[in-house]
Image (cartoon, rainbow, N blue to C red):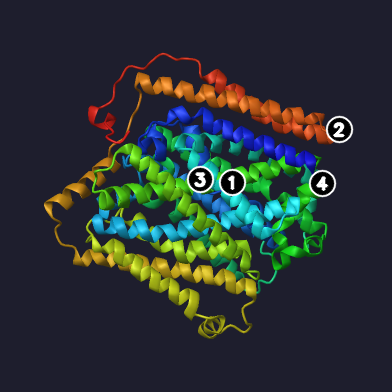
């Protein structure tokens, strides 16, 4: 274990170095602090878009679902890939063309000042709950691998994440996201290879899976499984394609880079499930009793499936590398969430309401860091509460939050792109309707109601009820919440001249491509490639030096493979940083203009 701790400490030192080296990329402006000034290349933006949907939950809650129910969990990640594909085909360039610093500024343009404040405050609790789930998953990893107490692990790791998040701006966050993406993909590929080899091949692992591999156990009604899969695709499509989550692409330097970033995230999300869950499926096929191995986890023992595989079957040092990567992945997700929330609070409440546009940029950045600290403390408290819910898995918790808390807010943020003639009150009133729908689905309707309504012969099992509640929530929001927003068109009246000007600007920006081919941007592009390429090259060499750890030959080969993958990417970035001829500007002046660069 001392080797693993040493690896963990070295990795954190490297992350701190990234933040330090990229500190000069950010000026004292909030645009730089929150979105890197909108000057980042597609591969950095794509990596952070991918990492926002990726955290320690993937290797705890999702891995536990894979251990229990086989293939079902893959549907969520393929649905994410579908969402990113739609980003690539249509939405990502539009998001970048919003030309805003925070997503709520786009809400203000589309729905007015009242909705700016409603969405500012309504979205924060959901973000805090999501981050609390991520932090809880991280605590499971740390306590499982190192035997730490869960409560103190949540507090300690939460504070570390908080400190690292507050001290870095968007450049450090996104740069570290790219490196973490490389490390995680390299590590998980090698872990999957070991699981497949030890399991006698993928076909053998699937055949020996103790339950139905496609639908899992405790599922008597196949129709519930089919409906769940359909609505998960619908949910992830909506999550990835709305104004509130457009922040992923606001950092891109132009429309084309936003589009390429979405394609990278799509490809990564397709490849990920093919390698992430083989260790969990292998553990299930071996018949290992995780509850006996980790009695302290109680009903959540399945959440340790992936980590237990690494602990039992991977070479010395790999545990530390994996835990470091998982910690960093969760930190990046929380960092993005803290950065986004503090940006929304400062730019959409503190600056316009508290300071009435009188605050300097230096003051706004300082307040942003204080706000991030407050959000960090709330996230720690939320994670502690989730940990106290002994009977609920992380997988179910994440599904409920997405279906009942997040989804209602996405409806006006999505439909507002396409339905133009709605009154301003359509935005906030749709949230009220969505809250009522979520309350009825979450607290009023029971399994007995469903059984009676559909005339079911058998009572719903615990898993069936869990999946069906998600289906009910999403279906009800599509029909009632979405239907309500559409019906508000019947009450549309011409807007005031000022409001109509804002709405026209919103849709004009959406339709106007953004190009950025200046000499200064090209110089910054090369600087990004060179600096990050050198850091990644160092990381690759560092991982390859782990072959010196006393392991069997195959164990040393694992570290050589991991380090080699990272090293090749680093060298490729350094090579690509060679100056190239500057293209002649040939774009329309209107399309080139970006008032929020």
Answer yes or no: do the residues labelled 1 and 4 have beta carbons within 8 Å?
no
* As drawn, 308 above or below 451: above
Say whether disc 1 or disc 2 marks the residue closer to the N-terminus. 1
Q: Residues within 10 Å of mark 2 (few under 14, many from 20)?
A: few
Residue sitting at the far left: 497
Residue 160 numbered tag: 1
- Residue 213 relative to residue 362: left or right: right
Among numbered discs 1 and 4, the one appearing first in the sequence: 1
Q: Which residue is mark 3?
A: 335
Quarter in which the C terminus is drawn: top left
Q: Could you tell whether 232 is left or right of 364 in the image?
A: right
Badge 1 local density, few (<14 within 10 Å), some, or many (20+)?
Answer: few
Question: Residue at label 2?
Answer: 553
Q: Is residue 212 visible?
A: no
Circle 2: element type: helix
> Which of the two marks, 1 or 4, is nearer to us in this view?
1
**First-in-chain label (4 vs 2):** 4
Q: Position of residue 373 (x, y in %)?
A: 47, 50
Residue 313 is tagged as 4
User: Where does residue 109 sit, x and y in percent of width and height?
Assistant: 25, 50
Q: CA distance from mark 1 to mark 3?
A: 11 Å
Question: Sequence-wise, which precedes: disc 4 or disc 3?
Answer: 4
* Above or below: residue 373 compared with residue 444: above
Q: Is residue 47 above or below residue 161?
A: above
CA distance for labels 1 and 2: 36 Å
Give the camera-side residue of 342 and 68: 342
Residue at the image point whose x is 25% and y is 46% from the top = 507
Gap in angstroms between the C-alphas marked 1 and 4: 29 Å
Check disc 1 and report its element: helix, strand or loop. helix
Name the residue: 33% across, 51% down: 104
- State how far apart marks 4 and 3 are (Cα): 32 Å
For the question of whether residue 53 can be seen, the reply is: yes
């Amino acid at each position: 274990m001392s080797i693993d701790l040493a690896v963990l400490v070295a990795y954190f030192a490297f992350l701190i170095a990234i933040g330090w080296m990229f500190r000069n990329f950010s000026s004292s402006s909030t645009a730089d602090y929150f979105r890197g000034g909108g000057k980042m290349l597609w591969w950095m933006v794509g990596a952070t878009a991918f990492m926002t949907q990726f955290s320690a939950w993937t290797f705890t809650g999702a891995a536990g679902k894979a251990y229990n129910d086989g293939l079902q969990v893959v549907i969520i990640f393929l649905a994410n890939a579908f969402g990113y594909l739609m980003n690539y085909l249509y939405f990502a360039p539009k998001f970048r063309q919003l030309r805003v610093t925070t997503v709520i500024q786009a809400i203000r343009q589309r729905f007015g000042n009242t909705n700016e404040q409603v969405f500012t405050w309504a979205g924060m609790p959901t973000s805090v709950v999501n981050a609390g789930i991520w932090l809880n998953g991280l605590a499971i990893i740390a306590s499982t691998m190192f035997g730490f107490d869960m409560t103190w692990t949540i507090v300690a790791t939460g504070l570390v994440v908080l400190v690292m998040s507050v001290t870095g701006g968007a450049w450090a966050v996104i740069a570290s996201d790219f490196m973490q993406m490389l490390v995680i993909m390299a590590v998980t590929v090698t872990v999957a290879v070991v699981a497949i080899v030890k399991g006698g091949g993928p076909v053998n692992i699937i055949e020996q899976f103790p339950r139905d591999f496609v639908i899992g156990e405790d599922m008597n009604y196949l129709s519930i499984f089919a409906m769940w899969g359909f609505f998960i695709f619908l949910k992830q499509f909506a999550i990835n394609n709305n104004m509130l989550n457009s922040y992923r692409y606001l950092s891109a330097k132009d429309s084309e880079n936003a589009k390429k970033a979405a394609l990278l995230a799509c490809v990564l999300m397709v490849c990920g499930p093919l390698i992430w869950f083989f260790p969990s499926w292998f553990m299930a096929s071996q018949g290992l009793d995780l509850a006996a191995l980790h009695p302290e986890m109680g009903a959540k023992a399945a959440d340790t499936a992936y980590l237990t595989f690494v602990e039992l079957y991977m070479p010395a040092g790999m545990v530390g590398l994996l835990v470091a990567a998982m910690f960093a992945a969760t930190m990046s997700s929380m960092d993005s969430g803290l950065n986004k929330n503090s940006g929304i609070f400062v730019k959409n409440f503190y600056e316009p309401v508290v300071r009435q546009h009188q605050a300097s940029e230096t003051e706004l950045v300082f307040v942003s860091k204080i706000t991030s600290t407050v959000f960090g403390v709330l996230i720690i408290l939320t994670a502690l509460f989730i940990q106290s819910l002994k009977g609920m898995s992380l997988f179910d918790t994440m599904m409920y939050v997405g279906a009942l808390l997040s989804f209602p807010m996405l409806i006006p943020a999505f439909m507002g792109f396409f339905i133009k003639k709605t009154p301003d009150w359509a935005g906030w009133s749709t949230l009220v309707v969505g809250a009522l729908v979520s309350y009825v689905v979450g607290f009023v309707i029971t399994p007995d109601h469903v059984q009676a309504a559909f005339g079911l012969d058998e009572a719903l099992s615990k898993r069936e009820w869990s999946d069906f509640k998600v289906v009910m929530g999403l279906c009800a929001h599509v029909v009632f919440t979405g239907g309500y927003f559409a019906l508000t068109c019947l009450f549309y009246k011409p807007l005031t001249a000022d409001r109509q000007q804002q709405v026209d600007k919103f849709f004009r920006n959406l339709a106007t491509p953004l190009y950025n081919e200046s000499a200064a941007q090209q110089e910054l592009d090369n600087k990004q490639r060179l600096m990050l390429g050198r850091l990644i090259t160092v990381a690759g060499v560092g991982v390859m030096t782990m072959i010196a750890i006393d392991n069997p030959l195959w164990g040393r080969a694992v570290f050589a493979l991991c380090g080699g993958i990272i090293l090749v990417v680093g060298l490729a970035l350094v090579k690509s940083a060679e100056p190239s001829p500057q293209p002649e500007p040939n774009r329309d002046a209107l399309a080139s203009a970006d008032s929020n660069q």
